[in-house]
Image (cartoon, helix red, strand yellow):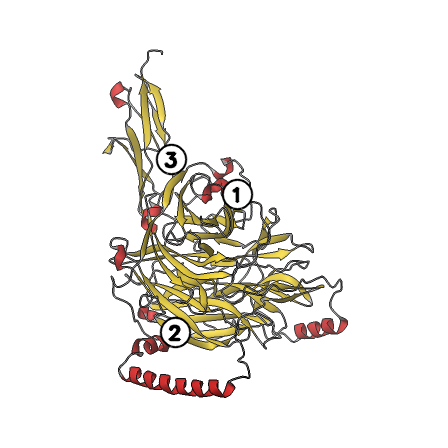
Amino acid sequence: MKKKSTSQSAFFNLRVLIGSVLCLTGIFVAMLGMGGFSSVFAQRRGANTNQDAPGTQTPDVVRMVGPVRQDKDLRDLPWVAPKAEHEEQPLYRHPRPTQPPQTSSGYGTSGLAHVQSLLKNIWQPQPTMPGPLLTFEGHNNTCGCFPPDSDGDVGPNHYVEAVNESIKIFDKNGNTLSGPTSYNSFFAGLTGTPCANANDGDPFVLYDPVANRWLISDFAFPSFPGTSFYQCIAVSQTPDPVAGGWFLYALQVDPANPTFLGDYPKFAMWNAGGSPAQNAYFLTVNLFSGPTTFNGVRVYALNRASMLAGGPANAIGFTMSAADVLLSYSFLAANQRTDSPPAGRNEMVLAINSSALAGDPETLVHARFFHVDFVTPANSVFGLGPTHQPNAEITVNTFVNAAVSPGFNTDIVPQQGTTVKLDTVGDRMKVPVVYQNRAGVESLWATHENLLNYPNGPVAVRWYQFNVTGGVFPATATQQQDWTNGNDGLWRWNSSIAVDPNGNTVIGYSTSSASAFPGIRYAGRLVTDPPNNLSQGEGTMFNGTASQTGVRWGDYSMTTVDTANGTDFWHVNEYLATTGTSWHTRIGKFNFVGGGGSPTPTPTATPTPSPTPAAPFIVVQPKDETVSVGNSAKFKVLASGAPRLRYQWAKNAVNIAGATRTSYTTPSTTLGDDGSLFVVIVTNAEGSVTSKGAKLTVTSMAGP
């Protein structure tokens, strides 16, 4: 907070100020002449590839706890109750004053406001965006907590949803396959860490289309403030998230600062190859040691190759203090979804400012490279210099964080029938940042909120496309827009963007106004549409039917493209069915033509290879067998993948002649066979996979 000077000695202070300014100006000019600020100004101009040389920074190397195998079908896990939940104070970059309590007005929209709303709807352009192909109910509030932090992702055969207490898995018709499964149950094997019994939410689900695997994560801690903060991470052993097993890991947020909570954790997958291989799961968190004490930002690269193999894994991390990040936080790494980056391309990380004062204009997106080296971790670098400043600043149209005075109040979204206003969480970029590579043209796509007509609103969704071809950050955005659907009066926030392989774009988000309950909508554009506009208009995924009596909303939603067909988009978000705090979540699927069809693909000169789920994978692993000496043992496997699958059984790493079926029966056993290990290698034209080992135990025929 700024303090006014007293009237006494004002003249003296003015003389001192003038003298100081002249002195500092002289120093500045001298340093400018010597090039003292050249690197800073180069960074601010954008459109550059400034990167620190490997070995010039000091990363942390943290060995994750694990892996712990979780081989049970999720439906067989015992229910372990989550921690007692409650509405917690949101953690922000700058301390926020406590807002006065808001109460329900007990009245609906006034007659004049209702008429104005109807007129606006009459004058709206007619959208061409089709309605949803499917929507179904996700989690609802069974924990007595809010907000839900609704998140999810779609794979070839499943939709996995996570909220603050548990996981639920559906088939792609909306039928429940498993869950809800609490995180305390899911991560129970990580004994000795808070992941075993003190999970606290902020969940994240990521489908990895390159490996055809899943990642699920949440954070865990016994208390806050406290001294034990971990990120709990699971990577599926197979493409089947229900019965295929998981590898469990626990990562201490910041071992050098054990009192730091890693809030708002967000993941991305990046697999660019090269030497050293740029292949990692990237994790970003905000650091807090207390409800109003922001300590900085932590970024991690997790050894994806080792985690997929179920091996020991390191995480390479950098911590930036609150002073290092200036006004920014909530960094987001770019997620590789439909296209592969060029070999060796470094990961890219974006952020915006959280303004110190409500209403301050912002014009920059901060851009950084993350170069990781798991072979020689000391060669890893993030941003520029010892404080990891941005590699570039991208200039964008002026925007205002979705907050108002007094203080920095983000509880500003109106609802029908109540004076309670909803939290925008509107001072950060929204997950995900999407990477795309179409015919060699590389782009990043991102969204955040923009408060229009400060302080009156409404809030609009600001979206961007940044051209990063050649690993060069641009000076300005390729495309950008504040999406208001023709200024129809609705408030739009809690956004999430997705882009299909052909460059068609969809954004899902929440909507509300004084004459509308909070609901779920989406808007899109085709790659052939004029730039800087979601020209296909808006579709309604689901209308809420009530208002919320608490302010917390979100804190985030998720939109993803289905890599199984490359044209369907999936979105998960929250709504209210009855007035109160008993939120529901809704999952929806939609595309640009409706009715289950697919838009005509846009031809590309050099199609980027896309991952295929046709490579073989093990559905049911061979099991250990115990037989008496002289008897035979039978091992079986169930595998899936594109035809034709071929099998080769091996004993103690030596192929068994003629053992080429889905099962193998041994000859009569001897005591010399005791302890032998059997595996099967399954292959097809798309690749191969080796099962886990099944142990043969041979016992003596004699009784005890």
Residue at mark 3 = 621
Instruction: Determine the secondary structure under disc 3.
Output: loop
Query: Do the residues under discs 3 and 2 have CB atoms within 8 angstroms?
Result: no
Where residue 652 sits in the image (x, y, percent)? 25, 31
Residue at mark 2 = 393
* CA neighbours of label 2 inside 10 A, class few (<14), some (14 to 19), many (20+): many
Residue 491 in view here:
yes
Residue at mark 1 = 182
Is residue 494 rendered to the left or right of residue 644? right
Amino acid marked by disc 2 = Glu
Instruction: Determine the secondary structure under disc 2.
Output: strand
For the point 48% across and 41% down, the residue is 186
- The C terminus appears in which quarter of the rendering? top left
Q: Which of labels 3 and 2 is toward the front?
A: 2
Query: Do the residues under discs 2 and 1 have CB atoms within 8 angstroms?
Result: no
For the point 27% across and 19% down, the residue is 671
Amino acid marked by disc 1 = Ser
- Marks 2/1: CA–CA distance: 41 Å
* CA neighbours of label 3 inside 10 A, class few (<14), some (14 to 19), many (20+): many
Instruction: Determine the secondary structure under disc 1.
Output: strand
- Dot 3 or dot 1, earlier in sequence: 1
- Dot 2 or dot 1, earlier in sequence: 1
Residue 568 in view here:
no
User: In the rendering, which numbered label is found on residue 147?
Assistant: none
Where residue 485 sits in the image (x, y, percent)? 58, 72
Relative height, residue 1 to residue 627 (above, below): below
Amino acid marked by disc 3 = Gln
Where residue 279 sits in the image (x, y, percent)? 32, 55
- Marks 3/1: CA–CA distance: 25 Å
